[in-house]
Image: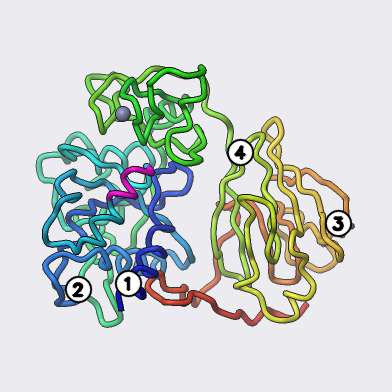
Amino acid sequence: MRFEISKVLDAIEGRVCTDPSLARAVLDLAEIIRYQDIDGGRPASLLRLGMVIDALSREMEEDSVQVYAVVHRALLSDADLTSNERMVVRRWADDGLVEVLDNPGDRMLEVADLLGVPVLTRVRFDGLRGRFPWLVEQPGRVVAPVPGAGGPVFIAHVGGGHAPVAGKRSPTGAKLLARQWRCPESGCALFGGGGGGGAFADLAGGADRSPAAQPPPSLRNGVPTCPRHGARLGDAGPRPRTEVLAVRVGGLVRRRFVLREEQPVVAGRAPEQEGGIMLGQWLNDEARRWISRGHVHFELRVGEVIVTDISTNGSGIRPGGSMTESDRIPLAPQQSRVLGENDMIELYPGVQIGRAEELPTGAPFTPTSVMAEAPTMAMRLPRP
Ligand SMILES: [Zn+2]
C-alpha cells in the first residue's frame, strides 16, 4: 500500500512546476489538500492535489498538464500529512518544483496575473478585485474545485465561467519574464544561490533548472523580489529564448515540452538522449514499429525551430497544420527544415509535434490519470 502511494506521489511530482512556460494553472497547496469533501478522507491529503490536476486535465482535454503550486511553509511540518507526504513536499520545495513562502499573501493571484493562468481556488478575494480586475472581468480565470461524480469538477466562481480559462501574461509579467534573476540568498531554489562561484554557475538553482525556467519574481513596491526570501533580485541578463512544443497523438495533446537555445531535444519511441521526449506509451504496435527510438531532433536557433529527421523511416511536414494528404511534405532521414509558425512535423500518421498553441486537441477525451498506478495507454491511431 505504501509503495503504491509512493508511485502516485511520484506521478503527481511530474505535474508540479514553477516553469512559466509549462504551468497551466496556479493553486495554493495548503488549501487544495484540505478539500475533505472531495473524498471524505483524512483532514489533509496530498492525493487531493492529484485529483485536482486530473480534473484540470479533463477540463483542458489535454494530458500531462502541470500546475504552479504556492505552498505555505507551515505545510512542510503539517501534522495532518503523513510523514511520507511531508517528505515529498520538502523535496519539491528543495528542487524548486513548488514555491514555499512564509506568508503566501496574494502571491497566488500575482502569479496568475503575471503568467495569465487561471486560479483553482474556493477563496473569493473580496479585497483584491480592484488590484486584479480580471478576477471579476474575465470569466473562468478563477474556478473552484468541488466534489463531482467522477472526481472533482470546477464550478463558476468569482468572475463566472465554470471552465478554467487562460488569459494573457500581464505587461509586467512579460517584462519580468524577459530577464533572468538572481537571489542573494545562498541556495535559493527559485532564483539560484548567490553564494559566489562563476557569474552564471549559480543561476542553475535546483538540479538542472534552466534560467529560462525561472518562476516570475514577486514585485514589491515595483522592485523584483524573491518571493521566498523577500530579498531584492539582481538582474542577470536576458532570459534565454524558448518555444513551447506539444506532442499530439491521435488528435489529443499528450504533453508539452520547452525547447531552449543550445538545448536540442530528441523525440521518438524511446530516445536515449538526456531530456528526450518518449512517445512509446501513446503508440499502437504499428506506430511503434515505424517510429525510431530517436526519430526527430529539435533545435532552437536564433528564434527558429529547426527539425531534423534522425529516423530510419523518415517523417513528414504538415505545412500550416494542413491535414490534406497532398500538402504533406516528406522529410527524409537526415533532412532538416525550419518549422514554420503553424507547421507540424508528423512522425507517423496521427503522431504530430508542433508549437503548443497551434495544436488544439480534439474531443471527446479521457486523459491518463495522474492517480493511475501504471499510466500507460494504447491509442488507436487513425488510418492514413
Ligand atoms: Zn531567494
- Name the residue located 38 percent from the left edge and 26 percent from the top edge: 193
Where residue 229 sits, quadrant-wise, is: top left
Residue 117's place in the image compared with 371, above or below, is above
Amino acid under disc 4: Arg
Q: Which residues are magenta?
A: 90-95
Residue 149 part of the magenta segment: no
The x and y percentages for residue 286 are 75, 80
Residue 294's place in the image compared with 364, above or below, is above
Where residue 292 sits, quadrant-wise, is: bottom right
The disc, 1 or 2, on the residue closer to the chain's N-terminal end is 1
Q: Which mark is residue 5?
A: 1
The disc, 3 or 4, on the residue closer to the chain's N-terminal end is 4
Amino acid under disc 1: Ile
The x and y percentages for residue 249 are 63, 69
Main SS of residues in magenta: helix
Residue 94 part of the magenta segment: yes
Q: Identify which residue, 141 or 309, lies in the foreground.
A: 309
